[in-house]
Amino acid sequence: MLGENFIIETKALIDTKYRTWKRNADLINSLLALPKDMNDAGR
């Protein structure tokens, strides 16, 4: 019983961490893409 709950909680934690990491990666990609777009617009 305790083991099952632990596994479920661990899976949920990993899932949340992965989603947070994915969102951060998307955010970083957006920020990195901004200067490139600004340079293109400046030309």
Image: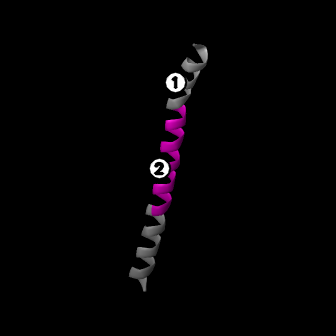
Q: Nearer the viewer, residue 33 or 17?
A: 33
| Residue 23 % position (x, y) | 53, 48
Residue 21: which disc? 2
| Residue 42 % position (x, y) | 59, 14
Left or right of 41? Residue 9 is: left
N-term mark: 1 or 2: 2
Quadrant of the drawing holding the N terminus = bottom left
User: In the rendered image of this protein, does residue 28 appear above or below residue 20?
Assistant: above
Judged from the image, the secondary structure of the residue bearing numbered disc 1 is helix
Q: Magenta span covers which residues? A: 15-31
User: In the rendered image of this protein, does residue 20 appear above or below residue 28?
Assistant: below
Q: Residue drawn 54% across and 36% down?
A: 30
Left or right of 39? Residue 7 is: left
Packing grade of label 2 (10 A; few <14, some 14-19, many >=20) is few
| Residue 7 % position (x, y) | 41, 75
* Residue 3 found in image quarter: bottom left
Q: Nearer the viewer, residue 38 or 23?
A: 38
Residue 1: which disc? none
Judged from the image, the secondary structure of the residue bearing numbered disc 2 is helix
Residue that carries the numbered disc 1 in the rendered image: 36
Q: Nearer the viewer, residue 17 or 26?
A: 26
Q: Residue drawn 53% across and 23% down?
A: 35
Q: Residue drawn 47% across and 49% down?
A: 21
Q: Residue furthest top?
A: 43
Packing grade of label 1 (10 A; few <14, some 14-19, many >=20) is few
Can residue 5 be found in the magenta stretch? no
Decide whether the magenta segment is chiefly helix, strand or loop: helix
User: In the rendered image of this protein, does residue 22 appear above or below residue 1?
Assistant: above
Which amino acid lies under the numbered mark 2 shown in the image of this protein? Trp
Mark 1 or mark 2, which is nearer to you? 1
What is the C-alpha distance between the residues marked 1 and 2? 23 Å
